[in-house]
Amino acid sequence: MSDVKDPAEELEREGTLPADAAEPADEPAAAPDAEPAEAPEEELELPEGANLLRLLIEAQKEAKTNEDGWQRARAEFANYKKRTAKEQSSAFQRGQLDALVSLLNIIDDFDRAFESVPEAISEDPWIGGVSMIQRKFTSLLEHYEIEAIDPTGGPFDPNLHQAIGAEDSDEVESGHVIETLQKGYRAGEQILRLALVKVAT
């Protein structure tokens, strides 16, 4: 039989080995109510094709939104250009008509002058030259579609005529114009000047 002795038995016998060193310590018991730890959830990774499809759909939606916005902006700009062009045209036309209105009194003077030209000089070349100037003024009014208003014999219309006198007449029906003292002028529906008239009572 071997004489080799176990050192732990020798130390225990001599009283030098701690009592709890002789046997391994018991492991602490797990708490009865402790719940098992949950494992972290793993992100669901889509297949590469599904990711590409999702990106494509999002890109198509964004492109549609951008296209709608672009078309709306384009339509608004087109309307703005039309409105601006119309306003500029109207302003230009008003300016032209205002300038022509200032010439109406001059045209009236020409008309009155030629109504009273003496017969003796009616064939004079000078009268012919002045008559050409009058015709140029008349052509200018026609170019801008300005029409004279001469309502003699017609019914009185307060929208077109301004009565500055009234008298009895055997030749003209009551409420009609006896005489036009000054012609009026109109450009389309716009009245540039009312005609000055006498009305039969």
Image (tube, grey):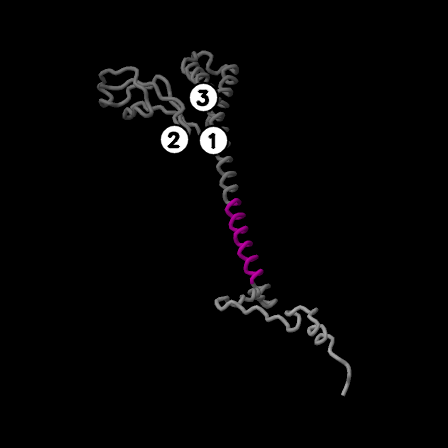
- Seen at 55% across and 58% down, the residue is 58
Residue 33 appears left or right of 46: left
Which residue is the extreme one toward the bottom?
1
| 176 or 188, nearer to the observer | 188
Badge 3 amino acid: Val
Q: Amino acid at mark 1?
A: Ser
Graded by Cα atoms within 10 Å as few (under 14), some (14 to 19) or many (20 or more), the crowding at tag 1 reads few
Magenta span has 58? yes
Q: Which mark is residue 90?
A: 1
Q: Position of residue 152 (x, y in %)?
A: 31, 22
Name the residue: 45% across, 18% down. 107
Q: Earlier in the sequence, mark 1 or mark 3?
A: 1
Mark nearer the N terminus (2 vs 3):
3
Label 2: which secondary element: loop
Q: Is residue 133 above or below residue 142?
A: above
Looking at the rendered structure, the kind of residue marked 2 is: Glu
Residue on which the image places disc 2: 189
Vertical position of residue 47 compared to residue 111: above or below: below
Q: Residue at x 64, y 70 (%)?
A: 19
Q: Report how far apart the C-alphas of labels 2 and 1 lie in the structure.
A: 14 Å
Residue 47 screen position, x and y as percent: 59, 68
The residues colored magenta run 54-74
Q: Is residue 176 magenta?
A: no
Position of 79 relative to 13 (above/below): above
Give the labeled residue for mark 3: 101
Total marks in image: 3
Front residue of 104/189: it is 189
Q: CA distance from mark 1 to mark 3?
A: 16 Å
Image quarter in which the C terminus is found: top left
Quadrant containing the N terminus in the rendered view: bottom right
Mark 2 neighbour density, 10 Å: few (under 14) some (14–19) many (20 or more): few
- Quarter residue 41 falls in: bottom right
